């Protein structure tokens, strides 16, 4: 069953974010993940949540998502993360069909 990594991002540096994005995208693809949402407009329909840009990545299953997050490939993106952005990041298991 698919699993989803959801990130609410605040961009700190426009140049460094491009380095982070390239490294993160390559690591995601290498682990069978794919972007479902990557930045688009956000409209709050209920409540007080005012997220920044949202990113949603789908992985084949939760264990693959966990391996990606702990991978050497993603570690290369993490080297520039703090300069590039701050975020809230969660992992969500998908539904059983």
Image: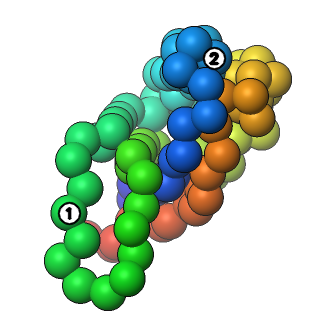
Secondary structure at badge 2 equals helix
Q: Residue furthest bottom?
A: 47
Q: Nearer the viewer, residue 39 or 37?
A: 39
At horizontal 20% and vertical 63% (from top left) the residue drawn is 43
Q: In screen coordinates, is 5 left or right of 51?
A: right
Could you tell me if residue 61 is visible in this image? Answer: no
Category of crowding for the residue at label 2, using alpha-carbon neighbours closer than 10 angstroms: few (below 14), some (14–19), many (at least 20): some
Task: Note whether 24 is above or below 88 in the view shown.
Answer: above
* Image quadrant occupied by the C terminus: bottom left
Q: Which residue is mark 1?
A: 43
Could you tell me if residue 43 is visible in this image? Answer: yes
At horizontal 18% and vertical 77% (from top left) the residue drawn is 45
Q: Earlier in the sequence, mark 2 or mark 1?
A: 2
Q: Which residue is mark 2?
A: 16
Image colouring: rainbow
Category of crowding for the residue at label 1, using alpha-carbon neighbours closer than 10 angstroms: few (below 14), some (14–19), many (at least 20): few
Task: Note whether 15 is above or below 45 in the view shown.
Answer: above
Task: Note whether 96 is above or below 73 in the view shown.
Answer: below
Q: Position of residue 18 (x, y in %)?
A: 53, 15
Q: In screen coordinates, is 4 left or right of 71?
A: left
């Amino acid at each position: 069953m698919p699993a989803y990594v959801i990130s609410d991002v605040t961009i700190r540096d426009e140049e460094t974010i491009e380095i982070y994005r390239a490294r993160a995208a390559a690591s995601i693809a290498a682990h069978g993940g794919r972007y479902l949402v990557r930045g688009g407009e956000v409209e709050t329909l209920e409540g007080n949540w005012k997220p920044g840009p949202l990113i949603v990545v789908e992985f084949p299953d939760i264990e693959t998502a966990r391996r990606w997050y702990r991978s050497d490939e993603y570690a290369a993106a993490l080297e520039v993360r703090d300069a590039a952005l701050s975020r809230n990041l969660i992992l969500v298991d998908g539904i059983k069909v």
